[in-house]
Amino acid sequence: MKTPILVLQYPNPERGSATIALAATRDRKALQAFKEAVLEEARLATMDWEADEVLHAQNQTELERLNKLLGLLIPDDENDNGVGESGRE
């Protein structure tokens, strides 16, 4: 599996909703921190008791989707995907 790339984007008001990429990294620590932040936000969204039943179901489904995808792309243990540091693309 290829190593994911974390990209910092900035809105470009001259091009509507388009963004420009300012920086990118494949650093494992940065990817892990990103994964943790995204999953925490998704977990918090599922705890919103003011959301109606449909929104709660949507938030729960999104958390499950993110857990699955980010777990595949950014495993907690480098060896989970069979690729270590030497397997970078």
Image (cartoon, grey):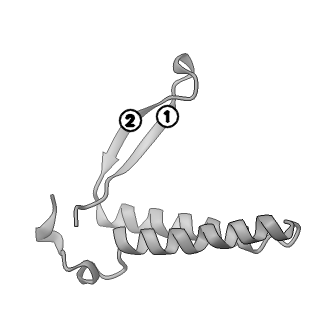
What residue does disc 2 label? 22
Q: Are circles 2 and 1 on residues that touch, CB within 8 Å?
A: yes
Identify which residue is drawn at 28% across, 56% down.
Answer: 26
What residue does disc 1 label? 10
Find residue 80 and report its image quarter: bottom left
Looking at the picture, tell me which residue is in the foreground, 75 or 37.
75
The circle on residue 34 is none
Q: Residue furthest front?
A: 54
Amino acid on which disc 1 is placed: Tyr
Identify which residue is drawn at 63% across, 71% down.
Answer: 61
- Where residue 53 sits in the image (x, y, percent)? 84, 71
Figure quadrant of the C terminus:
bottom left
Dot 1 surroundings within 10 Å: few (below 14), some, or many (20 or more)? few
Q: Which SS class for mark 2? A: strand
Q: Is residue 18 above or below residue 51?
A: above
Identify which residue is drawn at 63% across, 65% down.
Answer: 41
Find residue 59 and report its image quarter: bottom right
Left of 89 or right of it: where is 6? right
- Where residue 57 sits in the image (x, y, percent)? 73, 71
Left of 81 or right of it: where is 10? right
Q: Which SS class for mark 1? A: strand
Dot 2 surroundings within 10 Å: few (below 14), some, or many (20 or more)? few
- Where residue 46 sits in the image (x, y, percent)? 72, 72
